[in-house]
Amino acid sequence: MLRLANPIYDVVFKYFLSDPEIARLLLSRLMNEDIISVELKPTEHLLKVPLRSLTVYRIDFAARIKAPDGTEKMVLIEIQKAKLPTDIMRFRKYLGGHYQDSGNIYQDSEGGNHPRPIFSIYFLGHNLSDIASPVVWVKRGYYDVTTQERLEVQNEFIESLTHDSIVVQIPKLAGKRRTDLEMMLSLFDQSRRDPENQHYIEVEEGDFPAEFLPMIRRLVQAAAEKEVCRKMELEDELISDLANMERSIAAKERIIQEKEEVIKEKEEALQEKEEVIHEKEEALQ
């Protein structure tokens, strides 16, 4: 039994993907295509929590990948441990930034410039409602509107302005080992967590095919890094503080709503009294 650092943590995921071969293997398996090179650029965002003197880093991952035919893509990778109300807008803002980035171009063999198509991958630590599949691939298609015929082509204009996505629902990975992809993603399976410390996952090395062993060894190395372990603790504190802030905001919103309902009831009562007075005045008149 081996003890691995839990890759659902930002700091561990960054350490995990900082090995180019591991990043290439992970993306090749997820995207089901041959990738010959990966250039990963994590971006750290400073977050300060007002409830305490705590500063941590939120990490976004952008990878440039190259296929054997020389074409390139920009792959955006998000790992989200806890569900927060700002998630979707943050994802949209991050996507928009890469669509606007004039640096996201590549040159073909003849020196022509092309915008890199974008592919997004989301690792979610919570479930999406009404979707039971642990891994969901959102694939676009080109269709003739009149005939409904699918067009088996790809066009640079369309590929540059729209994108496919993969969503991994980490809680639904529990016990799933039906394919090599699910076997690889079982490294994120939170049912494997050490019951005494959620920073670690326990696996049997013999359960995995040889090609995934470098991934296991990389996570074993991460578990031995003191700085990685320290930052996992900071991430836990951040999530706890954000959850407390969210509960506090929700409680205040409930109080405001209750006060607004009381005010509305009083206004309605005053209006009824005014109507009664008006009716009496008319009767007297």
Image (cartoon, helix red, strand yellow):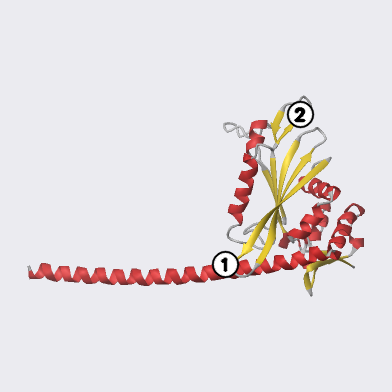
**Which three-letter amino acid code belongs to the residue tagged 2?**
Asp
The answer to whether one can see residue 178 in this image is no
CA distance separating discs 1 and 2: 48 Å
Q: Position of residue 144 (x, y in %)?
A: 61, 32
Mark 1 vs mark 2: which is more N-terminal? 2
Q: Residue at x 70, y 68 (%)?
A: 236
Q: Residue at x 82, y 66 (%)?
A: 226
Can residue 47 be seen here? The reply is yes
Answer with the quarter of the image where residue 66 lies.
top right
Q: Quadrant of the N terminus?
A: bottom right
Outermost residue to the bottom: 196
Residue 269, position as x, y percentages in the image: 28, 72
Identify the image quadrant of the C terminus: bottom left
Badge number at residue 108: 2
Along the line of sight, the residue nearer the viewer: 177 or 93 = 93
Q: Which residue is under mark 1?
A: 246
Question: Percent position (x, y) of residue 107?
Answer: 75, 30
Query: Few, some or many C-alpha atoms within 10 Å of disc 2 (few <14, some 14-19, many ≥20)?
Result: few
- Identify the disc placed on residue 186: none
158 up-or-down from 275: above or below: above
Question: Quick check: 275 left or right of 109?
Answer: left
> Is the residue marked by circle 1 packed among few (<14), some (14-19), or many (20+) residues within 10 Å?
some
Foreground: 244 or 168?
A: 244
In the rendered view, tell whether residue 202 sits above or below residue 66. below
